[in-house]
Each structure stands twice: as C-alpha cells, then as structure tokens.
Amino acid sequence: MRIVDADGHVIEPEAMFKELPQEFYPRRPIAVYLPTDTERGDFNGCWLVDGKTYPSIGGRGRIIFFIPEDERSKKMDVRQQSQTLADVEARLADLDRFHIDIQVLFPTMFLASMAEDVKLEGALFQAYNTYVGRACAKSNGRLRWVALVPFRDPEAAVQEMRRVKELGAVGIFTMGMVWDRTLADPAFLPIYEQAAALDLPVCVHLGWASPAVTNLFSDGHAFFVSATIPVIWGFTYTMAAGLLARFPKLRLGFMESGAEWVPYVTHQLRRRANPISIIRGEARRPIGGGGFDPRYYQDPEELFRSGRAFVNCEGDEDIGYLLKHLGEDALMCSSDFPHGDASAEENYVTHWRERSDIPERVKEKVLGENAARFFGI
C-alpha cells in the first residue's frame, strides 16, 4: 500500500524571498519576534509585510500560525531544517517515522491573505513556488507540492501555472474566498480552464481568506469561523456555479476542514437547485434558485462518486456516514505535519491501519489511492 499524505506543510523561511526581483525586494516579508510574556506566548513570531504583521499581534483579526524560529516551532519534535525544507533529507526521515511514502505540501504563511498589492502578491507566490519546487526536486518524488497563483491577476496566474507545471507542481492552491471575491467569480474562469488543461487540480484549503471576515473575530473561535468556514463557502459557490461540468477535466479538492459538513451542504444545495422539493410529503418550492448556473449544475454527490470532487476527512469523523453519502473514491486523509494545531494527525497511518470498522480496500483508497488519483501522482 502506497501512503500519500494529502496535506503536509512548509514553514517558510526568510531565505525563500532572497531572490525576489529588485523592485519587490525592499518589501520582502521580514520575520519579527516578540518577548514570550505577551498574550501570544510561544507563538511569538510574526511576518512584517507592507507595514502590517501576520499573524496580527493582538485585537481583532486573530490568526495563529508558525514561523521559523519562534518559540513554539523550537519546542516541536521536528528539526527546523525539516520544517522549512532547508534539509530535504531531514523531512524525508520524518516521513519515514510516520510511515508516509509521499507527502503533498501546502504553505503556512500564505494561509492568510496578506499582500493587498496584487503585483507584490504575485512576486511572493513566485518566490514560494521556486523555493518549494527546488526542494521537492531533491526528494526522489516523495515530496510533491501545490503551487500558489495570483487569482486576482488571472493573466499572471495562467503564466505562473504553466511555469509551475514545468517545475513539478501537482495542483494549485486557493482558500475558500479570494479576498472579497467568491471562487465563482467569472474573472477566475481562465484560471480554471488552464488548470484543467494542465491537469492541475484546484485545492480549496483552510485559511484566513478574507481580511474583512478575519477582522470580525478576536476570540478562541476565530480559527474555526474565519479559517475553516470559508472552505464551505468555496464548496457552495464552485458547486452551484457548475465549474466541474463547465471544465470536464477539472478536479476540485477541499482540504483541512473535515468532511462531515459535505452531505449537509449538498442537501442545502439540492433544496435550492431543484424546481420542486418534496418535504414531509408535500410539494414545496425551493428556497431560492439564485446563484446556480442551470447549464452546468450537477449534484455534488455525483461529482464525488465520479472522481471529480474530493475531500480530506479526519480520523475521528463518522467514516461510515461519509462512505454512504460520498462513496469510497472521494476521501483522502493527511497528517498536517509539521503543524501542531487541531488538524494535526501525525500518526494517522497507524491509527487507520488499526481500525476494524473499515474494509481493507477502503483503507487503501483513503490512505493513498484516492490522493494519488486526485493529484495525478
């Protein structure tokens, strides 16, 4: 059985940005460290980008993620060089510890929308793609990566997608919104068209996608309501717009947000999409048909069962319930390594192998086969 970790992470080092073009180099992200006796405690690092700090130091707009050399990162049972990919062999040794054959990498700092200047954002994304692409090229195929592209500049995004395909990317990254725009924005259609043509699946990942939404929250629920919930918005808009029918070779994946919400949201979409719904034996008009493209809309369950849509599930979810509603070919799982937040399941391979409530053929699919099909590896 080949184990494919569908969602690992890179903790970006400052060295990632040393090759920025001269016009952007003075605006490169700078790592700043606070004393550990502030309210942030061991999460005492932040990036300074265009005069703002990410994660924010305090108040509204609560964001939590690691940066290299902060106290939280130093206390992890993972070498700094593995976290940042400065030492690819160190990361591969960590994969061996957790019985992982292949790991697909996602960003950390770019789980927040931070560069308002679209051109600066594009330059930072290029720097990320170049750094991670080079590191993965040293891994003999064991490290794969999902590229960042500037959705707000579709022409530049298309060009970057062509470049990263040559570098070895196996997907493109987005969060559930693009700043203040939904994933169904017509301006993004050229990006989806190019993704389909290049066989690069679109990965809708957890993250603080919309600064306007992020700035609403300052308490302990902020991670869920401002980083996780936008994935559900991304699902709602991409499905209602019929992106997968519009682009028959496109694949969509929904990452690091669990999966039990998918049947619920699918049910809500059905209630609005169908001309007549039958509830309690009575004919009933839909709640509202706005937002659907009738030329392309398909029932999401059909898309999951046909290998067009995928979702990353978590080990403590009701897998039987998910299999009933989504089938056994749509579910993936992951470690979230080296992050240590609520999504982390570093020993997930062992836990899945020990389960007696799941058939072996399903374990093989969830632990590797489905992710291999999704990412084309």
Image (tube, helix red, strand yellow):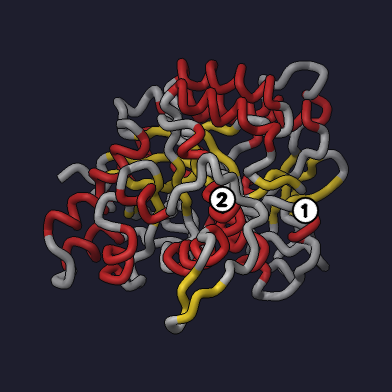
- Give residue 110's quadrant in the image: top right
Residue 86 visible in the shown view? no
The residue wearing badge 2 is: 240
The amino acid type, in three-letter code, at marker 1 is: Pro
Which amino acid is tagged 2?
Answer: Ala
Residue closest to the eye, 298 or 185: 298
Quadrant that contains the N terminus: top left
Q: Is residue 124 left or right of residue 78?
A: right
Q: Secondary structure at mark 1?
A: helix
Instruction: Classify the position of the C terminus by image quarter.
Output: top left
The numbered mark, 2 or 1, whose residue comes first in the sequence reads: 1
Dot 2: element: helix
Q: Position of residue 75 (x, y in %)?
A: 51, 60
Mark carried by residue 211: 1
Q: Quadrant of residue 123?
A: top right
Locate residue 289 relative to residue 78 in the image: left or right. Answer: right
